[in-house]
Amino acid sequence: MPKILIIDDEPHILMMVKKMLERAGYDVNLASNGNEGLKQFRKSPPDLVITDIIMPEREGLETIREMKLLRSNLKIIAMSGGGKISADNYLETAKIFGAAIVIEKPFTQKQLLSSVVELIGSVEDSV
Ligand SMILES: [Mg+2]
């Protein structure tokens, strides 16, 4: 079963995305910041990482860079609603750091799911 690690400091986003991806058949792990995400990443290597950008402890851009150093072919989706600077800037940088797909918040569940399928295929494909 494809394994997905979701990193976001907003609990309702973690829960919403987890529910949606589990319903689609994926195995899901959660982390609430980049440090926790890296711990999970080492403990239970995922097929795909979905990460927020603006988070306490360790933010997303640094997390993306770190994970790409650990595994250069890792598939990553970055999502951001922006902050002091616009989401566009963060997401452009996320791409440079190695995110395969970037999504601006708020996004629809359908939009995120189709990005996941594009990168790692649907669960039906893998069984
Ligand atoms: Mg955030």
Image: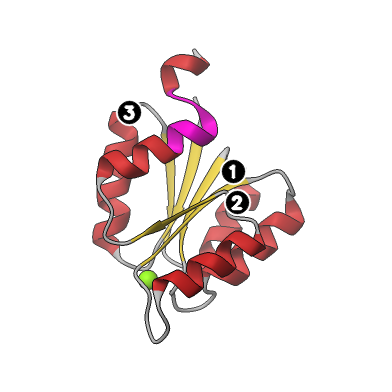
Q: Amino acid at mark 3?
A: Ala
- Residue furthest toward the top? 127
Please report the bounds of the magenta region as a residue range: 116-122
Confirm or reject: label 3 Cβ below 8 Å from ligand 1: no
Confirm or reject: label 1 Cβ below 8 Å from ligand 1: no
**Could you say which is closer to the camera, residue 78 or residue 95?**
95
**Could you say which is closer to the camera, residue 28 or residue 77?**
77
Question: Which numbered dot is residue 74?
Answer: none
- Residue furthest toward the bottom? 84
Numbered disc 2: secondary structure:
helix
Q: Residue 8: where, in percent of width, then height?
A: 40, 63
Question: Measured along the vertical axis of the image, is residue 124 above or below residue 38?
Answer: above
**Could you say which is closer to the camera, residue 28 or residue 117?**
117
Question: Which numbered dot is residue 44?
Answer: 1
Query: Where does label 2 land, which residue?
Result: 41
Query: Where does label 3 land, which residue?
Result: 24
Q: Is residue 103 visible?
A: yes
Decide: few, some or many residues near mark 2? Use Cα within 10 Å; few <14, some 14-19, many ≥20: many
User: Circles 1 and 2: CB distance less than 8 Å?
Assistant: yes
Which residue is at a point 31% across and 62% down the rendered structure image?
A: 105
Tell me where residue 82 sits by quadrant.
bottom left
Which residue is at a point 74% across and 49% down the rendered structure image?
A: 72
Q: On the rendered structure, is 43 left or right of 89?
A: right
Decide: few, some or many residues near mark 1? Use Cα within 10 Å; few <14, some 14-19, many ≥20: few
Which residue is at a point 67% across and 64% down the rendered structure image?
A: 65
Q: Earlier in the sequence, mark 2 or mark 3?
A: 3
Q: Is residue 35 visible?
A: no
Confirm or reject: label 2 Cβ below 8 Å from ligand 1: no
Colour mapping used in the image: secondary structure
Number of marks drawn: 3
